[in-house]
Image: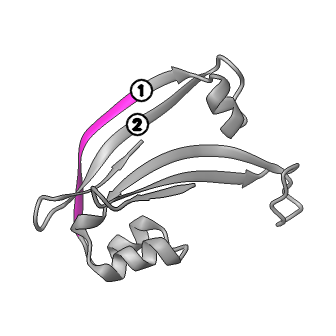
């Protein structure tokens, strides 16, 4: 799932990392996959050249790899950890057990060269 906001020049992407529970198969089918990570990233498109924006929108290259490819040095700020219960909304997106405690973190990715925020991650 993705959403581009032209007004504030941000791009929101939902990332779901899957693991194949069937070690004998390389096929990712619904019956053999398990969600092991769920993330949300808001990218500050105002901080990127058109080449990076186009690759975010039109390729499957990971955001972190794009930062490496374009030699953008980063640091992080505001790292915080949290715990929450698996509720009905998360249950619909993942394989979590209802009411089980889930753990996560948030942080902001900063461009070292100009101190602009590049992305916020949950």
Q: Where residue 112 sits in the image (x, y, percent)? A: 15, 63
Which residue corresponds to mark 1? 82
Disc on res. 18: none
Give the quarter of the figure containing the N terminus: bottom right
Q: Where residue 98 sits in the image (x, y, percent)? A: 70, 20
Can residue 120 be seen in this snapshot? yes
Which residue corresponds to mark 2? 105
Mark 2 surroundings within 10 Å by alpha-carbon count, few (fewer than 14), some (14 through 19), many (20 or more): few
Q: For the point 55% across and 53% down, which residue is it?
A: 15
Element at label 2: strand
Q: Where residue 60 sits in the image (x, y, percent)? A: 55, 73
Q: Residue 74 vs residue 105: left or right?
A: left
Does residue 113 show up magenta in the picture? no
Of residues 96 and 40, which is closer to you in this image?
A: 40
Element at label 1: strand
Task: Looking at the image, tell me whether mark 1 or mark 2 is earlier in sequence order.
Answer: 1
Q: Which residues are magenta?
A: 73-82
What is the distance, in whole Å, between disc 1 and disc 2 at their CAs? 6 Å
């Amino acid at each position: 799932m993705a959403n581009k906001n032209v007004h504030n020049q941000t791009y929101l992407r939902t990332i779901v990392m899957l693991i194949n529970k069937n070690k004998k198969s390389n096929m990712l089918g619904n019956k053999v996959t398990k969600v092991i990570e769920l993330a949300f990233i808001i990218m500050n498109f105002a901080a990127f050249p058109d080449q990076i924006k186009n690759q975010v929108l039109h390729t499957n290259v990971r955001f972190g790899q794009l930062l490496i490819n374009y030699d953008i040095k980063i640091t992080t700020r505001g790292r915080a950890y949290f715990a929450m219960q698996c509720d009905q909304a998360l249950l619909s997106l993942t394989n979590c057990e209802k009411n089980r405690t889930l753990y996560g973190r948030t942080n902001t990715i900063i461009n070292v060269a100009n101190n602009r925020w590049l992305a916020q991650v949950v």
